Amino acid sequence: MLQVRSLSVRYRGRSVLEDVSLNLMPGELVGLIGPNGAGKSTLIKALLGLVPIESGRISLRGQPLHRLRQHVAYVPQRSQIDWDYPIVVQRVVMMALTRRLGWWRSPDAAAHQAARSAMEQMQIWDLRDRPIGSLSGGQQQRVFLARAIAQAADVFLFDEPFTGIDKQTELVLLNLFAELRSRGHLVLVCSHEWGSALERYDRLLLLNRSLLADDRPQAVMTLENIRRAYGENTQLIDRRSSLESIIAC
Amino acid sequence: MGLGVKTIEARWGVFEDGWLDWLLTPLQYEFVRHAIAIGAIIGMICPMVGSYLIVLRMSLLGDVIAHAVMPGLAIANALRIDLSIGAFCSGMCSTFVIAWIRQQSRVRVDAAMTLTFSTFFGLGIALISLLKTQLDLEGFLFGDILNVTGDDLLHAVVVGGAIAIAIKLHYKELLFYTFDPLGAEAAGLPVQLLHYGLMAGVTLAIITSMKVVGVILAIAMLVGPAVTASLLVKELHTMMLVGAGLGVLSAIGGMYFSFYWNLPSGAAIALVIFSLFLLALLFSPSQGILTRRRLGHRE
């Protein structure tokens, strides 16, 4: 479905990604992990066409991805958003329809209905007229999830979605992942999670400039792989379960 | 430059005849009618584009462009072409330079803006000296309200109308871009085009404001009423509409103060803008200092 072939990205003269190749399938929940500065966000941005590619090719269903951008939904990191911006919830969700409506059309009844149904699914319909700055961290995250749903995309890219959210939103997020996966959508999550949380993914991509491992979570999270990604000082605290207890120094 | 009724007697004599006379007397003069009309137009358009600068946290960009029009004015004056064309090209050029510095380096945006505006302003002064142009520097810096012509008014109406129509037509795209630039780009919106379209709007609004308040105080009109509006409302479009209302009020109020107290119009308008901001800061239903305290006591 989503193919990346020999992707290399340079940023201000520095190599950020080197020769990354991937083949992600519909209905997969994929976790993208690696140390800070490993190029996780850059890979997400490259998939979205937000950074210039030095070499390589990204395609969705055999076509260059930049031609199918409306099929890719993106949930940004919380830190990328100005939460003091004067905007209410439903206008953020309506942004999902901007491209589909085109330059000259205002949102029609169908667009309003798509936004409403996404807001209801994310349990934020009652908050639709609230400024986003007045919401809790979890509610804010659900606004962006609703925006991604309203876009009716095939590929969903999440940039650190578990940062700064409450338990209710975490459950909503996990349910959404399960639902998107069951509908045959591809879900790629850039994450700083550790331990058993990583078992929720079908596949893990371990990245540090190049792709170090691409397999099931248990197969990826070996001490050898972790040391390759995070350095030789990485230690296992508890050898009974590598997923529970790896720390990076 | 003030509108200037010369004597205190005349000033207060008119006031004592009643409010209506106080309001109508300045309107007997054609230059005052022109000044008030153009003031009202810039009062409307500046807060509309200024709202975008505020939400982008780039309010100082207005100041940069205002200073950066100088070289264009000097060159246009030397070549005897329309000053507005020179000012527009020069102002836009400064936004390209800032974007280029940001793309090519880790230099922070505030540093890039400061460097750019001081360089353009310096270049403007140097060009005026080198080209020996007869540019009315004082009028350019502080406004030249006494010489607003019918053509200036027509120009302001056309520019204001074009900006308002462009914002109305592309509100949803501009909202997306200014709120979540990465998301907008990921969705396939032409963010560069939106950015420079916005910069063109800001530059045009500043050039139109030059005659009334001068380039130095154009930033007050761009940012002031919109900031005041942001204390009163919760959405961008209402911020623009309330800002436009406050802008018109500030421009007309400033003109009257200028007329009766013989103050420079730009200075009078800037002071009215700040007074309105202060009132909103104190009494805004949601964010006012006094209102907030009262609500706090109730709780």
Image (cartoon, coloured by chain):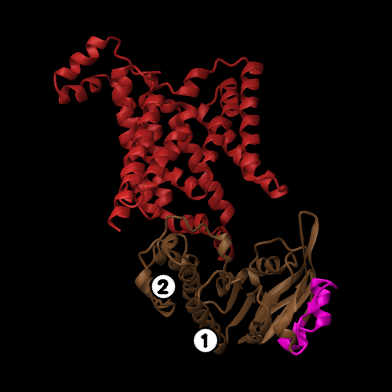
Residue A10 to residue B226: above or below: below
Q: Which residues are magenta?
A: A214-240
Q: Nearer the viewer, residue B20 or B147?
A: B20
The number of callouts visible is 2
Q: Secondary structure at mark 2?
A: helix
Disc 1 and disc 2: Cα gap in Å?
18 Å
Q: Is B281 part of what is drawn in magenta? A: no
Q: What residue is at 58 percent from the left and 39 percent from the top?
A: B92
Q: Earlier in the sequence, mark 1 or mark 2?
A: 2
- The image quadrant that residue B71 belongs to is top right
Q: Amino acid at mark 1?
A: Glu
* Discs 1 and 2 carry the same chain letter: yes
B275 sits left or right of A240 in the view: left
Q: Which residue is more in the foreground, A152 or B11?
A: B11
Question: Which is more toward the observer, A135 or A234?
Answer: A234
Is A42 placed above or below B104 here?
A: below
Rendering colour (chain A): brown
Which residue sits at x=31%, y=41%?
B245
Q: Residue at x 70, y 73 (%)?
A: A58
Kindly identify which residue carries mark 1: A179
Whether residue A228 is visible here, answered yes or no, is: yes
Residue type pointed to by label 2: Ala
Residue A101 appears in the figure: no
Question: Residue B125's spot in the image, x, y percent?
Answer: 62, 21
Q: Which residue position is annotated with label 2?
A: A115
Q: Chain of mark 1?
A: A
Q: Which chain is red?
A: B
Give the quadrant of residue B17.
top left
